[in-house]
Image: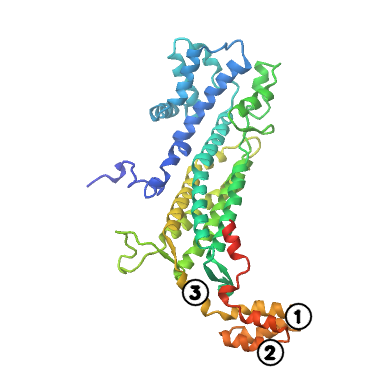
Amino acid sequence: MNDRTSLELSPLTALSPLDGRYARHTAELREVLSEYGLIKQRVLIEIRWLQHLAEVVGLSELGRLSSAERAYLNALITEFSVDDALRIKEIERSTNHDVKAVEYFLREQCLAHPSLGRIVPFLHFACTSEDINNLAHALMLRELREKILLPRLRRLDETLTELAHRSADAVMLARTHGQTASPTTMGKELANVVYRLRRQKSQLEKIELLAKFNGAVGNYNAHHAAYPTFDWASIAREFIESLGLIWNPYTTQIEPHDYIAEFAAAAARINTILIDYCRDTWAYISIGYFRQLRVDGEVGSSTMPHKINPIDFENAEGNCGIANALLEHFCAKLPISRWQRDLTDSTVLRNLGVAFGYMVVALETCQRGVGKLELDRHALVADLAQAWEVLAEPIQTVMRRYGIADSYEALKALTRGARIGRADLHRFIDTLAIPVDERTRLKGLTPAAYLGTAVAQASAI
């Protein structure tokens, strides 16, 4: 009998579907939001701070770096490998401190160089661990946003926009409260989704990624103890901005994570819009407005051969929900820390990859689902042909224009809860005390022609 506790980690044995069933969707995240990604950013920050002290601040005790020394340090960043990360984890088993392990790793690397042993005392100079970590998380989120989230959102935008334009004139019944309502077009309904997603994507793009580099409790205490005449706030700001981040001048030991809460909230709003869209599309598939393209070899049901289930939209909805459960926790928890620092944020931040992993899976499956949609215009027309009651709205509105009292009530008595046809409406119109040309115009209305600006709005998105 196999010892099940000895199963090696693989996509088949992974506890999380992000590293198992959905691994193909999340592979790109591994370099960015994994433990390896965090360690890699820590190494970068430690080295860039050392270089900043030597080449920008110009500490005389540290001295300038030669071109060969600079190249060696840069290579520690650009050639950082999984083996390097494993060495750091090995050191951490002794230190029981992840950031200190990075410092000791860099000390090893510097001592292995013929001339860099002199800089070892300036590794992690005047830093608290959170100085390194908060910058690392900001850089990770920047890479996540620019390289992973925004490209997928743009691709989904393009696909939905193209579908909106194709179906701009595809007239359909609206269904407010699930009941027949004034007609719209499928393109206009998709345009609504596109506009909402664009607005939230724009807000996600604009969120400032903040960072601090001010020591143990945010006051540059150690910095001033060593070099009391230096303007350390300006030095920290210049260093942070050199990494493309925004300086936060007021913090405790930790950057308070308000911007991460903002980032998570923006992502959660995007997910919520996607949930809304997926549920509506699921329903449109259910009533036959959309067909799904058949993929050879796929099976919809283990017993019902005819089925093509809307699994992409169901999958996206479920994964958006899981992502939002974590993202909403980030919003509520991360800005809170007891006094100058507690460690509850650390374990939560290790789940950035989990939250955004589920979001990425949702974006991928939603994209795939949209790509398989085929509009059935005949189903839309058939529904419209059975819904002449929706013209009660324009008729009573024209009656109001001509001062007819109780217009709404008259149409309510004729149509509420009833199925009526063209002839019923025309008989009613013939009784109205309005100009003849207006009666003619109203009798020319059909549900399919009662559209307002739907086509123009869909075409303009």
Q: Is residue 53 visible?
A: yes
Distance from the alpha carbon under mark 1 to that under mark 3 = 32 Å
Q: Is residue 40 above or below residue 278?
A: above
The residue to which callout 1 is attached is 402
Is residue 52 found left or right of 91 in the rendered image? right
Mark number displayed over residue 431: 2
Q: Amino acid at mark 3?
A: Val
Is residue 193 found left or right of 296 in the rendered image? right
The image shows residue 352 at horizontal and vertical percentages of 51, 43
**Which residue is more in the foreground, 332 or 412?**
412
Q: Is residue 66 above or below residue 459?
A: above
Q: Residues within 10 Å of mark 3 (few under 14, many from 20)?
A: some
Distance from the alpha carbon under mark 2 to that under mark 1 = 14 Å
Q: Quadrant of residue 273?
A: bottom right
Residue drawn 33% across and 65% down? 301
Q: Amino acid at mark 2?
A: Thr
Is residue 424 found left or right of 303 in the rendered image? right
Looking at the rendered image, the quarter that the C terminus falls into is bottom right
The image shows residue 55 at horizontal and vertical percentages of 59, 16
For marks 1 and 3, the one nearer the N-term is 3
Distance from the alpha carbon under mark 3 to that under mark 2 = 29 Å
For marks 3 and 2, the one nearer the N-term is 3
For marks 2 and 1, the one nearer the N-term is 1
The residue to which callout 3 is attached is 381
Q: Is residue 86 above or below residue 231?
A: below
Instruction: Tally the marks.
Output: 3
Q: Quadrant of residue 210?
A: top right
